[in-house]
Image: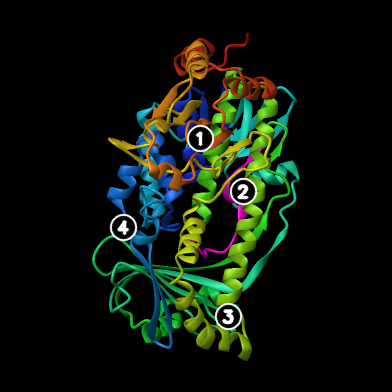
Amino acid sequence: MRCDVLISGAGPTGLVLALWLTRLGVNVHIVDKTSAPGTTSRALAVQARTLELYRQLDLADAVVAGGHKVPAVNLWVKGERKAQVMFETIGSDLTPFPFLHIFPQDQHERLLIERLEQLGVSVQRETELLRFTDDGDRVLATLRGPDGSEQAWEAHYLAGCDGARSRVRETLGTGFPGGTYKQVFYVADVDASGPSLNGQFHIDLDEADFLAVFPLTGEGRARLIGTVRDERAEHAETLRFEDVSGRAIEHLKVTVKQVHWFSTYRVHHRVAEHFRHGRAFLLGDAAHIHSPAGGQGMNTGIGDAINLAWKLAAAVTGQASDAVLDSYEAERIGFARRLVATTDRVFTFATAEGRMADIVRTRLAPVVIPAALHIDAIREFMFRTVSQITLNYRGCPLSEGAAGDVHGGDRLPWATTGDGDNFSSLAAMTWQVHVYGNANARLREWCSRYELPLHVFDWQPDYRSAGLARDALYLIRPDTYVAMANAQGDPDAVDNYFTSRGIKLRPAHAVLSARSDHVAPTGDLDES
């Protein structure tokens, strides 16, 4: 049995990777050892950057329609709300999705599976990756199917999206340094009432326990996430909601009517030493895990998948050499390390013990945080960070140049146009050029000759406010990040960019045609 890319793990990360690869004409086989998709809500938050990227496959509207927009974050101390951050007023000129969005993981997975099946790809359930070897020019893997029989598979590449206990990472022998928080986390999905059940996000800063209320779709529905640090943590497996609910009831004035789901778990903070080894890759929880502070985990795994997908497609179709795949680790591992460090600091602040820590949380923070949040720059920094729109790949091998405030490796700034926005063309999932103002004749001729889409936007002052330079050239990657910025609009710079990195320009229709020739009707690879 053969495929281009074998994907182990069908959580959101694996499903997104399969979706993007399939749309790019790559033959995938995705397996998962579970018998069915998850039935619990687990990860909730879908950040603005994820929704922006989801526009490439027309997923954003469905996610927004099926979930709940969170317009604000509230900080509580001693049973009183002390500060509020309104997302919609902060991010309205930064992104088409200026809010935190709640879309439970079970619904999220069902949507991704449905879209994948519409493209003719199904998850092979009750199937486990047992072992694999990398022969240099292919991966040979052994899978155990639902009936217990073993299947031999050959693939160009293997993607380990198989979670914190990743078999792929274990087989590669890649270290997973980090640690485990001493606190036990609990999670409860409830029907409730009270002032903190108003559709917004609420965090309690009192004692050395983390406590947050996440709104869910439906009136009075919420997710409670908290920690247990005393002697109760030693018997986490026997805890009931009644054993941990007192603080939520007392501090955040939550009146619980019904508990739909309750569970306890421990959280690690780790990042794999490498995200690539030969023809095998680590993504999502297989590559990095951290505290739930900020709702970053699932979104980061989805970002991994979209970053890697176009590079795998380029390598498989011959549009680029295998070397382009080295940029996956270069671009994603640094972000993962910074994210783990940041969420660790936030969680440590929220749970530090001792008299001084209590004074900082209950006396200083309620004064300092509201004052700081009155400063526009601080509010914007907070939104940019949590929403992941500030994530960039500056200084990485595929990033070059600068024009205005935009550097190679940056997320393309969002800006409205006369009839929409400048993100509309990004749904094409191809290399393209953006010019804000006038594109010179040489650039127009070059793009026409190489069939590189050129999008020219009539200049308006808002573009300068977004950081864009007039008449500059912005080369956009298939994953919507800026590959190169050139203030002169020089087509020779584009030519040199592709040539120096061994990337061949091929129009989208040519790539799909090449894949139809390459993949046999059965899905097997053409041995030639």
Which quarter of the figure is the N terminus placed in?
Answer: top right
Q: Name the residue type under label 3.
A: Arg
Q: SS of the residue at dot 3?
A: loop
Residue 285 on the magenta span: yes
Single out the mark in the foreground, 1 or 4: 1
Q: Name the residue type under label 2.
A: Ala
Query: Looking at the image, which residue is at 34% across and 59% down?
Result: 88
Q: Which residue is mark 3?
A: 229
Q: Which residue is mark 1?
A: 479
Q: Is the Cβ of the residue at disc 1 closer than 8 Å to that at disc 2?
A: no
Query: Looking at the image, which residue is at 57% across and 71% down?
Result: 347
Query: Can you give x and y, in whole percent of width and height, for residue 439 in the image?
Result: 46, 24
Query: Can you give x and y, in whole percent of width and height, for residue 152 in the image?
Result: 62, 27
Numbered range of the magenta stretch: 280-295
Q: Nearer the viewer, residue 323 or 39?
A: 323
Q: Residues within 10 Å of mark 1 (few under 14, many from 20)?
A: many
Single out the mark in the foreground, 1 or 2: 1
Whole-Å distance between the Cαs marked 4 and 2?
Answer: 28 Å
Query: Looking at the image, which residue is at 52% across and 57% down?
Result: 385
Query: Can you give x and y, in whole percent of width and height, for residue 67 in the image?
Result: 31, 54
- First in sequence, mark 3 or 1: give its number: 3
Q: Residues within 10 Å of mark 3 (few under 14, many from 20)?
A: some
Q: Is the Cβ of the residue at disc 3 closer than 8 Å to that at disc 1?
A: no
Residue 184 on the magenta span: no
- First in sequence, mark 4 or 2: give its number: 4
Which quarter of the figure is the C terminus placed in?
Answer: top right
Single out the mark in the foreground, 3 or 1: 1
Q: Is the Cβ of the residue at disc 1 closer than 8 Å to that at disc 4?
A: no
Q: Residues within 10 Å of mark 4 (few under 14, many from 20)?
A: many
